[in-house]
Image (cartoon, coloured by chain):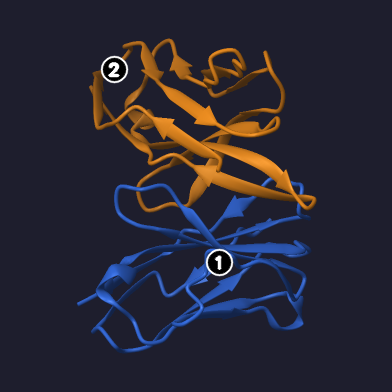
Chain colours: A orange, B blue
Amino acid sequence: GNSVTQMEGPVTLSEEAFLTINCTYTATGYPSLFWYVQYPGEGLQLLLKATKADDKGSNKGFEATYRKETTSFHLEKGSVQVSDSAVYFCALSDRIQGAQKLVFGQGTRLTINP
Amino acid sequence: EAGVAQSPRYKIIEKRQSVAFWCNPISGHATLYWYQQILGQGPKLLIQFQNNGVVDDSQLPKDRFSAERLKGVDSTLKIQPAKLEDSAVYLCASSLDRIYEQYFGPGTRLTVT
């Protein structure tokens, strides 16, 4: 079945450091790929998405490129801020009987120190 | 626009007791989802409704879990009887229709002792 594997956390960085959170997937067909973020005490929010190979999703300074050849969707940010501290989830969506079914990775907790 | 509302936010019960969670989706959203998020894991889909009909409940433990979405709006998820391994955050999400972006509520954190 479909699955998503993320780099294990927790990840701790200093403010303005470069961030990479690795994500690889296994899927039949051609899934859409997503990064969700969960801030403390809040629900999951969609951060960015890509729907086909070589697409780049971007939002709030974060980027991720859909790499079909390496089945990866790594999240990057050039200069992180304390406010980026959260748990990040990589997910894929495959259409099953016309419905979007999300499969999530285990999440990576990111802490940014001032 | 109001987001997805869930209540209660926290619940502590003893094993073998029953518990119910409530979700109010974004107005006009036809599709509603319940997810279980165990500590240290990503959310796992339990059940998906389209209006008031069930689309997918393949991962719902039907011997103890039940869910309904009367009138195609609010939904309740019930566990009876609860087990220790049911301790998790239960997330509700909704989308305009089945192919669109899902919006998540803040979740209900359940602790079974």
Between residues B20 and B62, which one lies in front from this camera angle? B62
Q: Residue B46, position in %: x, y?
A: 53, 64
Locate residue B17 relative to residue A47 in the image: left or right.
Answer: left
Q: Chain of mark 2?
A: A
**Label annotation for residue A95:** none
Is the C terminus of chain A in the top left, top right, bottom left or bottom right quadrant?
Answer: top left
Locate residue B16 relative to residue A88 in the image: left or right.
Answer: left
Q: Residue B56, position in %: x, y?
A: 66, 64
Q: Is residue B44 above or below residue B81?
A: above
Q: Amino acid at mark 1?
A: Ala
Q: Is residue A24 above or below residue B47?
A: above
For label 2, the crowd category at 10 Å Cα-Cα, with few meaning under 14, some 14 to 19 and many 20 or more, is some
- Residue drawn at (49%, 47%) of the image: A44
- Residue drawn at (53%, 37%) of the image: A91
Q: Residue B40, position in %: x, y?
A: 30, 47
Q: Residue A54, position in %: x, y?
A: 67, 13
- The quarter holding residue A66 reads top right
For label 1, the crowd category at 10 Å Cα-Cα, with few meaning under 14, some 14 to 19 and many 20 or more, is some
Residue that numbered label 2 is attached to:
A15
Q: Amino acid at mark 2?
A: Glu
Q: Chain of mark 1?
A: B
SS type, badge 2: loop
Q: Are marks 1 and 2 in contact (CB under 8 Å)?
A: no
Residue that numbered label 1 is attached to:
B5
Is the N terminus of chain A in the top left, top right, bottom left or bottom right quadrant?
Answer: top right
Asked if badge 1 and badge 2 are on a common chain, one would say no
